Image (cartoon, rainbow, N blue to C red):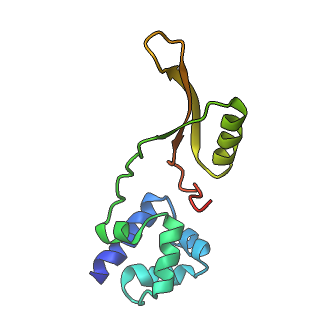
Amino acid sequence: MEEKIRANIKKFREEAGLTQKALADRIGKSESAIQGYESGKTDIPLSVIASILKALKISLADLERGSKAEVQAEKPMEILIYNQDDRLNTAAILVKNGYTVEQGKRQRTPTGKALDYFLRIRTYSESADTSR
């Protein structure tokens, strides 16, 4: 298992277009430390693995598997908000917090006289702040 982790660190580093020196700079280690981790001459502390995961933008599962998991696009959520000012204020807050927001309207009845106004919200962004 340890050999596989070492090989996968090298694989992901190369896929990211990083040299050992560049990865070392990103995680605050020396180039020789990275060489040691990849070659098996040096044990990799858990704190360093965490730093490597962050620098390479991968998960621990990705590192173990040797490939990035396919990102599943989340189904958009819709919120009906009829007041235009409320829709715009809500959209501004969501965009500020990293969400993708679309505004739309559709016919509520077959005659088209009644309309639904909505916001369609997607959380594709990893930076979306769901704590607020």
User: What residue is rendered at 56% in x and 72% in y?
Assistant: 21
Residue 85 vs 68, above or below: the answer is above
Q: Is residue 93 left or right of residue 113?
A: right
Q: Nearer the viewer, residue 8 or 36?
A: 8
In the image, residue 83 sits, relative to residue 23, either above or below, namely above
x%, y% of residue 92? Answer: 69, 42
In the rendered image, the quadrant that contains the C terminus is: bottom right
Q: Quadrant of the N terminus?
A: bottom left
Q: Nearer the viewer, residue 126 or 67?
A: 126
Q: Is residue 88 above or below residue 30?
A: above
Q: Is residue 98 left or right of residue 59?
A: right
- Residue 72 place in picture, x, y as percent: 37, 49
- Pinpoint residue 26: horizontal percent, then vertical percent: 60, 71
Q: Residue at x 32, y 65 (%)?
A: 66
Q: Residue at position x 50%, y 48% from top?
A: 124
On the image, the x and y values in percent for residue 120 come to: 53, 36
